[in-house]
Image: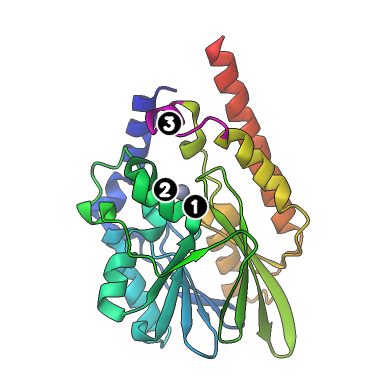
């Protein structure tokens, strides 16, 4: 695929979402213990009640901030109690609403040091250079308050998020691992912070002046976190972990719909196969 073809494909995919975001709203729900889903049908956002304030993982696009705020209220929380938004990676569909959220509710913004640099130094790579239909708000770099390092444990209240840098999808994407307790039972959640194909396509990397070595970084990152103990696999986008299939099973009465210790490595295997196929196709096209 050429860069223009990739751009057309993404713009088509997103058109209805930008035009009618309310069509992509979904009912917020509790996953396990203090962990809640507050995202929409396209982008995942998660809320955690730490016992000493709330932590939000990712904020979504600027044009869906009303869906996020509505979800937080509907769960019985106050957006003003969100102390931190911690970002999986520096793409506008995950940090786009953060500036406005901070302005309205006064939270602090957290991201890897590497992706804060990406957002500052390479806006087209961070905001998606095909996203000319996105509100200009996306292009205002968020004012980050804390920059994460690889291996850092980010603590708030009784929540401790172990942050592992998994470069590839962006140079500073992070995987998050954290314990959740419910009725004396403790389970570990895991979120791989960026596994989309688009941003590591050769033509896209070239267009955005990013190194082709991010392709190998992507494969290495999948290996870096293989074998982590993860009971609850969270998604960056709903198709990562069949968010809505699991939710449907939960609603149907399956108490373990979200508990699936094999899901993490299964996801990493599927991601590896997807990337290797695309890299092989690109190599064949180049001949
Ligand atoms: Zn992304």
Q: Position of residue 228 (x, y in %)?
A: 75, 60
Towards the viewer: 128 or 65: 128
Q: Nearer the viewer, mark 3 or mark 2?
A: 2
Secondary structure, mark 2, is: helix
Q: Callout 3: helix, strand or loop?
A: helix
Q: Quadrant of the C terminus?
A: top right
- Asked if 159 appears above or below 260 in the picture, the reply is below
Which of the marked residues, 3 or 2, is nearer the chain's N terminus?
A: 2
Q: Could you tell me how far apart the alpha carbons at marks 2 and 1 are, in whole angstroms?
A: 6 Å
Q: Is 119 placed above or below 95 here? A: above
Which x, y percent locates residue 116?
A: 42, 55
Mark 3, residue position: 204
Callout 2 touching callout 1 (CB < 8 Å): yes
Residue 252 in view (yes/no): no
Identify residue for label 1: 114
- For marks 3 and 1, the one nearer the N-term is 1
Q: Which mark is residue 152?
A: none
The one nearer the camera, 71 or 278, is 278
**Numbered badge on residue 118:** 2
* For residue 67, side relative to residue 261 (left or right): left
Give me the residue at 42% from left, 51% from top: 117
Few, some or many residues within 10 Å of mark 2 (<14, 14–19, 20+): many
Q: Which residues are magenta?
A: 203-213
């Amino acid at each position: 695929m050429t860069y223009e073809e990739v751009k057309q494909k993404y713009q088509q995919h997103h058109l209805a979402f930008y035009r009618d975001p309310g069509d992509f709203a979904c009912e917020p729900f509790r996953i396990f213990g203090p962990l809640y889903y507050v995202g929409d049908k396209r982008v995942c956002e998660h809320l955690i009640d730490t016992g000493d304030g709330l932590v939000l993982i990712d904020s979504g696009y600027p044009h869906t901030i009303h869906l996020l705020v509505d979800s937080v209220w509907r769960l019985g929380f106050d957006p003003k109690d969100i102390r931190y938004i911690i970002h999986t990676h520096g793409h506008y569909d995950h940090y786009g609403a953060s500036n406005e959220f901070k302005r309205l509710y006064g939270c602090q913004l957290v991201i890897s040091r590497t992706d804060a640099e990406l957002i500052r130094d390479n806006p087209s790579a961070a905001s998606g250079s095909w996203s000319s239909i996105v509100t200009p708000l996306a292009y205002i770099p968020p004012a980050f308050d804390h920059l994460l390092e690889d291996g850092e444990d980010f603590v708030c209240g009784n929540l401790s998020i172990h942050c592992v840098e998994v470069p590839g999808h962006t140079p500073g994407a992070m995987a998050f691992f954290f314990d959740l307790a419910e009725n004396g039972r403790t389970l570990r959640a895991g979120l791989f912070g960026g596994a989309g194909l688009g941003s590591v396509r050769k033509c896209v990397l070239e267009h955005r002046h990013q190194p082709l070595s991010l392709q190998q970084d992507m494969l290495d990152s999948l290996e870096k976190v293989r074998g982590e103990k993860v009971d609850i696999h969270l998604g960056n986008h709903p198709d990562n972990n069949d968010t809505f299939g699991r939710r449907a099973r939960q609603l149907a009465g399956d108490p373990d719909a979200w508990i699936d210790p094999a899901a993490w490595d299964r996801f990493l295997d599927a991601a590896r196969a997807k990337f290797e196929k695309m890299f092989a196709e690109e190599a064949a096209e180049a001949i």
